[in-house]
Amino acid sequence: MSLEQGDPPSFHEDALFGAIRKRQSNRQAFEDRVVGDDLAGMLVAEARDEGGELDLVSGDDRAAIVRLIGEGDRIQMAERRFRRELASWVHPNRSRSRDGMRGYGSVSAN
């Protein structure tokens, strides 16, 4: 891999690059309600228009995905190196660090 001179960024690419420092993650639980069919269809269409793909899952498929995520979490947390790296990224809630994530961001809902 190497860096090469290319075309100047488009207006859209500049806007996306500028948004990187403003991006925020929310790791809190989502609302427990069903997304309506109309909105779901719009989201799938928007993803396709942007060159992406969105698959909405429910029922048995959703339960299987939840089980797989739980299994992956257990495998990762069993690894001492993973836990050490995770601890290096999680900061106390009052930390002034602009890197990593604050402790409240890792709270999960039961």
Image: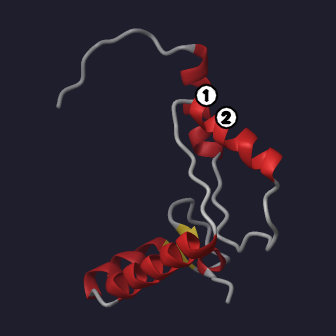
Q: Nearer the viewer, residue 69 or 94?
A: 69
Q: Is disc 2 placed on a helix, strand or loop? A: helix
50 up-or-down from 58: above or below: above
In percent of width and height, residue 75 lies at 32, 85
Q: Quadrant of residue 56?
A: bottom right
48 up-or-down from 63: above or below: above
- Quote the CA–CA distance across marks 2 and 1: 5 Å
How dense is the environment of label 1, judged by Cα within 10 Å: few (below 14), some, or many (20 and up)? few
Residue lying furthest front in this view?
Answer: 60
Disc 1 residue type (three-letter): Asp
How dense is the environment of label 2, judged by Cα within 10 Å: few (below 14), some, or many (20 and up)? some
Disc 2 residue type (three-letter): Glu
**Would you name the residue on which mark 1 appears?**
49
Numbered tag placed on residue 97 in the rendering: none
Tell me what residue is drawn at x 46 percent, y 83 percent: 70
In percent of width and height, residue 47 lies at 61, 37
In percent of width and height, residue 15 lies at 62, 26
Q: Is residue 77 visible?
A: yes
Q: Are marks 2 and 1 in contact (CB under 8 Å)?
A: yes
Q: Is residue 87 visible?
A: no
109 up-or-down from 105: above or below: below
